[in-house]
Amino acid sequence: MVKRDTLNLFRKIAKLVAPPPKWTVSQWADAERYLSPESSAAPGKWNTDRAPYQREILDSVNNPDYEEIVIKASSQVGKSEIINNIIGYFISYDPSPILLIMPTVDTAEDYSKDRIAPMIRDTPALTKKVGDPKSRNGNNTLLHKKFPGGHLTLVGANSPAGLASRPIRVVLADEVDRFPTSAGKEGDPLSLGHKRTKTFWNRKKISVSTPTDAETSRIEAEYESSTKAQWCVSCPSCGHFQPYKWEQIRFEGVLMECVSCKEQHNEMEWKARPAKWIHRNPDARKLGFHLNALASPWERWETIIYEFKEAKKKGPEKLKTWKNTTLGEVWEEKLQENDHIKIMHRRVNYEAEVPEDVLVLTGGVDVQDDRLEVEIVGWGLGEKSAGIAYKIFMGDPGQQAVWDQVDTFLAKEWTRPDGVTLSISAACVDSGGHYTTEVYEYCKAREHRRIFAIKGKGGKGIPFINRPSKVGRKKDTYLYNLGVDEAKDTINGRLKIENPEKPGYCLFPLNKDKGYDEAYFVGLTAEYKKLKSVGGVVTYQWVKRSSSIRNEPFDLRVYAFAAFKIFNPDLDYLAEHNLTGNIYKQSAKTKRRRRRGVLSKGV
């Protein structure tokens, strides 16, 4: 009996002093991690086998032969949980300084509150390592969490200060394709983060993202220089291993065809088969993984097919988003020199000044040194647009006469085939040229008609419509700063829609007195996106096809679109009640109705 007690005592002592087991990240997660109800439909104990493709990705962090890991993936494949498990592993099992870079400071704060805090709260192995956020010792703040042997810092890629201090062993970068091209004036934020790891021989740099545009995608470039692994599943008929590919999906019956034997099987049959990662470029110095939603246990192929059909109906913008977020693939813009010919051939004769389905009119005014150019655009359900009139007023914008002509034009009423008349609900006037003061004075006197001064700014990530600021001599004129790249992307995508029934379709008149001749369409398609190097960072920019081509028609469509977005009418309400944008005129009755919220979502 004494010997048995002594043996049990020695076993307990040995267990206490023994080194911890040599876990990989996936083994730690399976042993210690708990999913939180805020982030999972199935909270509770983590199980890597629910999505077996995650195991090799997680365990690649423990591979001493690679310091860089790239994950190019769609939504709904568990990207965030992969990041969380890596963070949890290094807090609990291999304490180290960790940096998590998000696109902005705001997204970093949201991630900390919505993902990191619940994980620490619900995973006991982390709760006992990270201090209570309610304590006053400052060890657990929203963006900085200390633990024995290390700390976790969350920063925004748009914050140079957050990227410029502290040595870091583990750098995690999430949604790198949404990073700004530069952190202030400091340069590429991803490179800045990676420089922080130089003092660690065992550093790890992990980049994760859903891809965006082909020529500017950071994650695509990183993946192409990696081992380029694909999650491959064996065919139920012939056993051939192959990745899940959209081209092999058959809508009828919701099947996938084997690339080798051509047999077709349903989703459950494929997902029940053995699968593994196959690295197509095994000699690369960084590990790279590509995943799409077809492999996800949380996505059904039937749903994916339905979402594809819906995106295709709505045009290139939605299709691009679907391809990025569902297939985890980049979007390639196809540029053609004769785009204007295709669009010009879509012109039709209008029965009246305005097509019958137009509900709202907006305008755009471009200011040149010797003229003012104006376009009136009509808007209907689904944001279908119709060119109403394009007109050039020659004259010196420094003189009142040319402004008077434009003012008369913007005050004109336009008639639909049913006899209903419409007037301009909002207009935007470009203030970025040599006549800024004149623009401010003109717009200030007409803000009650929603005629606003605007200034466009190019660059990735700038919202199209921002809150107006006060400018002018007395700081009493509203100025809207526009992120024109976002608008140009939208308009360019809509110009490619060929089905008049689709939302966003652009209609143009064949009537000769409307101003839509070939020169207009050349100007409308005068710009395209080109790769350019800015401060050593390669980025996509809108540029003119030729310096001799006028691009005012493209700019004017952007300004009229901005006026529509600023005005922000409820088109469904107007159509349902057989109304037009005219009801938004500033009458006392309209103001009372707007305060009750029945007319407009915006101004």
Image (spheres, rainbow, N blue to C red):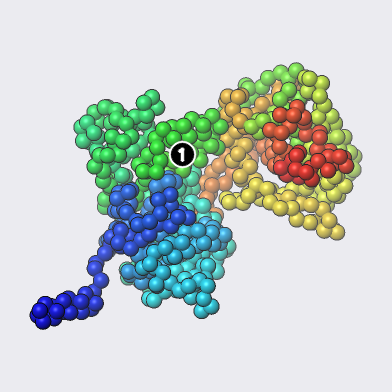
Q: Residue furthest front?
A: 1
Q: What residue lies at 26% left-to-right and 64% top-to-bottom?
A: 23
Q: Is residue 390 left or right of residue 4?
A: right
Q: Amino acid at mark 1?
A: Lys
The percent position of residue 297, horizontal first and vertical second, equals: 36, 43
Q: Can residue 158 be seen in this snapshot?
A: no
- Secondary structure of the residue carrying tag 1 is helix
Q: Quadrant of the C terminus?
A: top right
Q: Quadrant of the N terminus?
A: bottom left
Q: What residue lies at 77% left-to-right and 31% top-to-bottom?
A: 580
The percent position of residue 285, horizontal first and vertical second, equals: 31, 56
**Above/below status of 192 relative to 2:** above
The percent position of residue 446, horizontal first and vertical second, equals: 85, 44
Category of crowding for the residue at label 1, using alpha-carbon neighbours closer than 10 angstroms: few (below 14), some (14–19), many (at least 20): many
Q: How many marks?
A: 1
Q: What residue lies at 38% left-to-right and 24% top-to-bottom?
A: 252
Which residue carries the number 1 mark? 323
